[in-house]
Amino acid sequence: MQSTVGHRSRTTVACGVTVVGVCAAALLLANVLLYLYLDSVYHTGEQQVSPLVGCGPQHFKMPTMKNCTPWLQCSQINAEVHKLKLIGQGAMKKVYLAEWRGQKVAVSILSSLDYWEDFLHGLSMLQALQSPQVVQLVGFCLEDYIIVTEHHPFGSLLNLDSVLAKEQHQQHNTWQMRLRLAIDYVSVLHYLHNSPVGRRVMCDSNSLEKTLSQFLLTNDFHLVVNDLDALPEVDLSRNLLVKCGHRELTGDFVAPEQLWPFRNNGKPFSDNLMPEYDEKTDIWKIPDVTWFLMGRVSGGDLVHFHLFQIHERCKKKDPKFRPSALDVLKVYKSVYSSMVRDGAGFRDML
């Protein structure tokens, strides 16, 4: 009898051990699958899935289109693109909401020939940098100073909080979605710093508002860079550096090397004497943009905590000690993955 009880006890213990082992293995497998999923969504150096996939050069395909279409030329733009209303205006260009064959598009028209070179530069960058990180080019007509691009109804990142405040979008107002936007932002910088046409610097970013206005919020809550009119090239092998404009820059948002170094000496600003700099100016601005993107959501404080060290490195006064965009991107993705994984594990425990 005692032997039978002992046998049952050992059997019960063995079963318990087996169940624990199976549970542990299942939890481990779940974590591995979650990691692989997140890695596939945000794999370092890889581009996101986009409507551009499958289209050849100089073609476009918007989400509701079945086939790729060659970029529209002057005759097609004049005959088939119909302006609906003005949606944006600056010193350089006016932007209209328009329609082409039932598709909503954005039409940019040069306002002043004083900005012709910037206009041409922006178009050349759009042509050369077509990718999931860049707004999709639909067509252009140099004769009429027109560029047509895909329209994104949410507008620029300046509208982020107002979009998320709407009842139909409030479910997206989470730390996960906001951190994904920050990952998209750093992904754009990484792409521009390693682009097919050289290392490019975002020079139209002398304030937080100006920087946010360069990006569009897509319907599926990602972002694409839209304004490419000021992307000078850095090439250290050719001793090629940049200066973002010919006026004195001020404020804490711009990098220290972008400030007039002789201001405290009372020496007036001189563009000829202003030192040049490289793409690390973009890195300096990452923490400020991410702080805006994260907003005030539950879990946001924990995100900032995990990003503290990399952001501290971004704010190094000497640009040589700042990380690359890829370094920052790796940390952002790691934080995202670990926080999602830890959250999933916590829910499983409940």
Image (cartoon, rainbow, N blue to C red):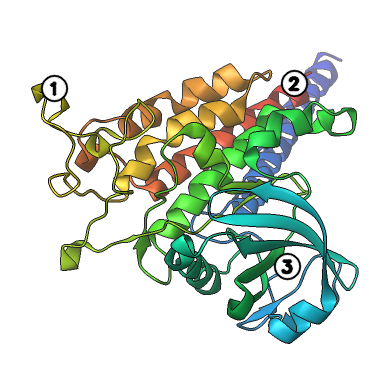
At label 3, counting other C-alpha atoms closer than 10 Å, the crowd grade (few under 14, some 14-19, many 20 or more) is some
Rendered image: mark on residue 51 = 3
Note whether 180 is above or below 136 in the view shown. Answer: above
Q: The residue tagged with tag 1: helix, strand or loop?
A: helix
Name the residue nearer the viewer: 76 or 217: 76
Q: CA distance from mark 2 to mark 1?
A: 59 Å
Give the residue type that dot 2 points to. Met
Q: Nearer the viewer, mark 2 or mark 1?
A: 1
Task: Look at the image and tell me in which quarter the N terminus lies.
Answer: top right
Q: Is residue 272 left or right of residue 339?
A: left
Looking at the picture, how far across and down is residue 314, in whole percent? 34, 34
Q: Is residue 19 visible?
A: no
Disc on res. 349: 2
Q: Residues within 10 Å of mark 2 (few under 14, many from 20)?
A: few
Q: Secondary structure at mark 2?
A: helix
Residue at 71% over, 41% down: 30
Q: Position of residue 316 (x, y in %)?
A: 26, 31
Q: Which residue is mark 1?
A: 264
Please provide percent x and percent y for residue 332: 50, 38
* Residue ID at (45%, 45%): 330
Query: Farthest residue in the top direction?
Result: 2
Q: Residues within 10 Å of mark 1 (few under 14, many from 20)?
A: few
The mark lying in front, picked from 3 and 2, is 3
Which label sits on residue 333?
Answer: none
Q: Are marks 2 and 1 in contact (CB under 8 Å)?
A: no
Mark with earlier residue (2, 1) = 1
Give the side of residue 281 with respect to residue 16, left or right. left
Q: Secondary structure at mark 3?
A: loop
Please tell me in which quadrant of the rendered image residue 177 appears: top right
Residue 127 position in % (x across, y down): 54, 74
Total marks shown come to 3
